[in-house]
Amino acid sequence: MEINWKRWLSITIALLNITFFTTACAPPTNPNQVVFSILSDPKTFNAVLSQESPNIFGYTYEGLITENPLTGKKEPALAESWEISDDNKTIIFTLREDLKWSDGKPLTSKDVIFSYNDLYLNPKIPNNYRDSLRIGQSGAFPTIRSLDNRRIEFKIAEPFAPFLDSAEIPILPEHILRKTIDQKDKNGNPIFLSTWGTDTPPEQLIVNGPYKLKSYITSQRLIFDKNPYYYKKDEAGNSLPHIPEVVLAIVESTDTSLLQFRSGSLDSVGVSPAYFSLLKKEEERGNFTIYNGGPAFGTTYITFNLNKGKRNGKPLVSPEKSRWFNDLNFRQAIAHAIDRQRMINNIYRGLGAPQNSEVSVQSPFYNKNLKGYDYDPKKSKELLLKSGFTYNANNELLDKNGDRVRFTLNTNAGNNIRESLGTQIQEDLSKIGIQVDFSPIAFNVLVDKLSNSLEWDAIILGLTGGNDPHAPNIWYVDGNLHMFNQEPQPGTQPIQGRVIADWEKEIAELYLKGSQELDMEKRKAIYMDVQVVTERNLPFIYLVNPLALSAVRNRFCGIQFSALGGAFWNLDELKICDKKSES
């Protein structure tokens, strides 16, 4: 549920020092590889069904267009050009000539039509992209048709400011996947839902991106090699990418990533603030550079399960906890009880700032006038008492029925920053009498709770961000990442009694209104307003906005670092220019 493909640390500091200050020289790096790390095995090799990030699809697939993270402008990808009608309701994309899939078969407009109409817009296929294709007040989907082998026409019911974002989603091969839509399982669902799992032999995965999967060893690594039919060429006419192989090492934690980077076995690592000073001292000797892209895009937050629904008569959240979580005073009390400055000082080592909004600080739509929630335990207690909570002789918080206020807080295990955040939140809330049972769990288990079982209390997680704040899958009430009050996904058991709050509807309406406005200044004003509503009602309690920091080996030519795209957003164009490690 996090990062762009080009964005990507239990071992103590003492052990790190012993390990690396006794290492005179990093081992040689394969000149034909670039090596990164990921914290868990991929959940799927199906780009449509994927709900996790990082994933493999930035290496293996492209859409019609892409966004340059340095400029924020849309640029050609599979489509060489596009035209927008005067009324802003018809867009015609023209594909590049002689596009091919990794098996050598032609890539044509039929693949585009299939990807949109039969996959992303198919109501029987749950995916993160469908919501972004809804247009305007009615939520109508675009009408998409092929004009010829290279041209695709999109017609929308009304002008829609973020429409071009939906042209960035991966295009998949009709000649391989058509049969998986036509064939149904015993429940009448397309067998596509079980297609291209992680047990699929790599040679069966047909792609259009710069790389194709070569091998996958569970809990160890994924290896990608160059797609010989990738369309891009450099200025000299040489086929891209320049770097023939990419390796994703699967590691158990961000600390392990740091160990492997400093031993020389990784080419890049996200720099945790906890280790910034340590790594900064090693830049020259380790032959790497730490890049600083400024405030990171995306959000880190704690959210409560506000869903009042039941499944088979059993509440998703126990009735007493549901009353607490749905009490605005309770959520605001939690927000005031979290010491963000302590997080910045201790966990982020000063390399961050309090986060107040779902919109990235670097976005032109960010509302700089938000007040946020200052650390104020006294105010927290006042809000709790106002809602009828009381304290016993041991300063333990009790609800109106005399029940101890206690809940479980989850995050994804192995992410040390989030684990540290959870530990501090546990400590902070104990000061206002709340017992938090903090339990990091495997990322795939966490995703299952959010998407399928819907049975959880509170989580710490993050969402990726971009320049445009339009995010219907998060803010529309039936969006598949509307996690704080999630509607059941297609193919899962229905629930009864889900209630949509008025403020949820207001947020959805404002995001819809923002998408309909083409005047930039008016659009900004709408998103300024919606941030005030989200700040007041706290569906997500935002924590800290860190700096976007990455350490990258000095063996690459062409690095153009940005907070939005990271160091390797243009991986297909990068070259290895220093093939030897330096002592």
Image (cartoon, rainbow, N blue to C red):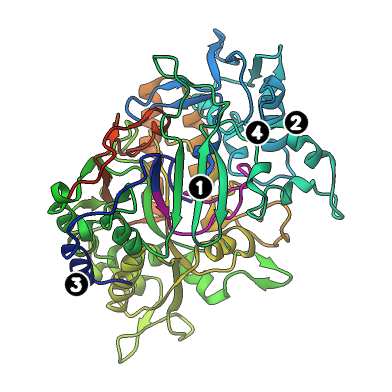
Q: Position of residue 442 (x, y in %)?
A: 50, 67
Label 2 vs 1, first from the N-terminus: 2
Q: Quadrant of residue 144?
A: top right
Q: Position of residue 409 (x, y in %)?
A: 44, 71
Image mark for residue 14: 3
Whole-number angstrom distance, CA of label 3 to CA of label 4: 48 Å
User: Mark 2 sits on what residue?
Assistant: 175
Whole-number angstrom distance, CA of label 1 to CA of label 3: 32 Å
Mark nearer the viewer, 2 or 1? 1
Identify which residue, 37 or 118, lies in the foreground.
Answer: 37
Is 423 a magenta residue? no
- The amino acid beneath tag 1 is Ile
Disc 2, SS: helix
Label 4 vs 1, first from the N-terminus: 4
Whole-number angstrom distance, CA of label 2 to CA of label 1: 25 Å
User: Mark 4 sits on what residue?
Assistant: 172
Going by the image, does 563 lie left or right of 455? left
> In the image, is residue 177 above or below residue 376?
above
Is 47 a magenta residue? yes
Which residue occupies 26% across, 67% down?
Answer: 379
Disc 1, SS: strand
Query: Would you say the magenta stretch is mainly helix, strand or loop?
Result: loop
Identify which residue, 119 or 223, lies in the foreground.
Answer: 223
